[in-house]
Amino acid sequence: MTATCVSDLIAQRRVALIAPDLPVREAYAMLQKMDAETLLVVSKEGPCGVLRRESLPRGMDTVGTRRVASVMTPAGPAIPWEMDTEQVIRVMRACGRSDLPVMSADGAVVNLISMRDMAVV
């Protein structure tokens, strides 16, 4: 039996990368357009947060000029896409996160893997 790798689970999914200074209204519009639940927040230093639809304020009229950084959840450590799922679960548990940014072989942040993805394995 071979181990399942992160790349096997996320191969068909694209996650939008957004900047922490993006207005919340624009991030919400992206979520709506993509019909997605999550956006990965990436700064110049690397992945810094996750923005979930459920964490956005109920009334978008209340966001004013707020930026994504004010409503995002901090991101866990980025993991390589070759990592096997057992290792991913250990990292998630160790850092108390239910999702982690994923890096390609060249070190670019390319996706996000969640505990929900792990349920497939």
Image (cartoon, rainbow, N blue to C red):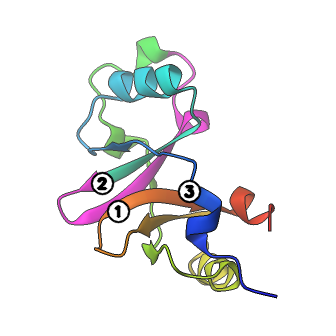
Front position in the image: 102 or 92: 102
Residue 58 image position (x, y, % from top left):
57, 21
Residue placed under numbered mark 1 in the picture: 109
- What amino acid type is highlighted by mark number 3? Ala
Residue at (62, 78) in percent of width and height: 88
Report the magenta residues as a range: 42-59
Label 1 – label 2 distance at C-alpha:
8 Å
First reached walking from the N terminus: tag 3 or tag 2: 3
- What amino acid type is highlighted by mark number 2? Val
Residue placed under numbered mark 3 in the picture: 11
Residue at (55, 81) in percent of width and height: 83
SS type, badge 1: strand
**Callouts 1 and 2 close, C-beta under 8 Å:** yes
Residue placed under numbered mark 2 in the picture: 42
Is residue 15 something that shows in the picture? yes
First reached walking from the N terminus: tag 1 or tag 2: 2
Q: What is the crowding at mark 2: few (fewer than 14 residues within 10 Å), some, or many (at least 20)?
A: many
